[in-house]
Amino acid sequence: MSVGLTHFCDKTNYNLDEQICCDSKLSDRKQDGQIIQCCNASGETYKNESEICCGSVYNKTVFENQNLSCCNGTRYQKGKEMCLGGEIKVRMSVGLTHFCDKTNYNLDEQICCDSKLSDRKQDGQIIQCCNASGKTYKNASEICCGNVYDKTVFENHNLSCCNGTLYQKGKEMCLGGEKIAVDGNRPGFRDDTRIDMIERQLQKIDEVQKTLHSLTGSVNLLKNEIYSVKIICRWLSYIGSLEYHKRIARKN
């Protein structure tokens, strides 16, 4: 019947422009002014404007009025459920939707750490994520510093944390996010590398102070001056400490 290519439905030759083959049965391609399509999952034909195929054929108006949608051939109710990766998931959170890997979860009850879900509270303690290690830890009894440690052991060994690295207070100090060894008797630095580091920190402070000084010419003069005073007070305290260490270092 067709010119060029020959089309068969089961063993029957048919006109592709006028007919459609669905589940080895022929139907007219147009009915009631609508295009007919094949719902392969059920083997039924459906009218593209008034019906919908989702595993089976449904009236489109009823489908939409019931707030339904389709997920990989299965109906689900929007608002209560969601389609994720071709699977239907219960929508747990209200408003914003939160995911851990591909799993929808309740942000108030669970925490996602390294793509794994954990209860937000355990043994009466709040659970947090130690991002550096990908482990969870209890905020009251454990501490995160590159890894998770028992807080009591941590404190008993006079340890502290410097930018994710352990250091021993008294023997070491944290300066600008770097762990620095200090003299056992006084906080003087022993080599030029550490002196140079102090110089770099002082240069950074000078740059901040210049920036803060330039703020006084802005439109929000009062707001910026108040902010500047707070920041400069903190930096002045820091500068005093650095200058002291610098003088000690120069003597060594």
Image (cartoon, rainbow, N blue to C red):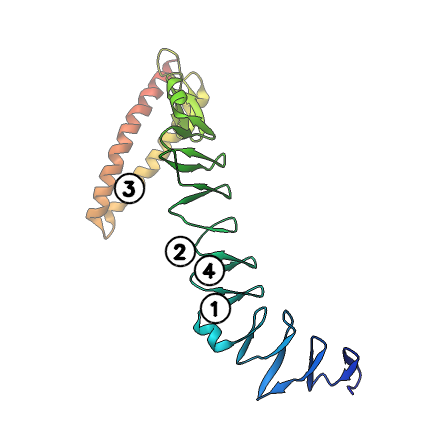
Q: Which mark is residue 60?
A: none
Label pair 3/1, CB-CB below 8 angstroms: no
Residue furthest toward the left? 222
Cα distance between the residues tagged 2 and 3: 38 Å
Tag 1 and tag 2, C-beta contact below 8 Å: no
Residue at image point 69% right, 87% down: 18
Residue drawn 43% across and 22% down? 167
Badge 2: residue crowd in 10 Å (few <14, some 14–19, many ≥20): few
Res 74 quadrant in image: bottom right
User: Marks 1 and 2: which is nearer the front?
Assistant: 1
Secondary-structure class at tag 1: strand
The residue tagged with tag 4: helix, strand or loop?
A: strand
In the rendering, which numbered label is found on residue 212?
A: 3
- All told, the count of numbered labels is 4
Residue linked to disc 1:
68
Type of the residue with mark 1: Leu
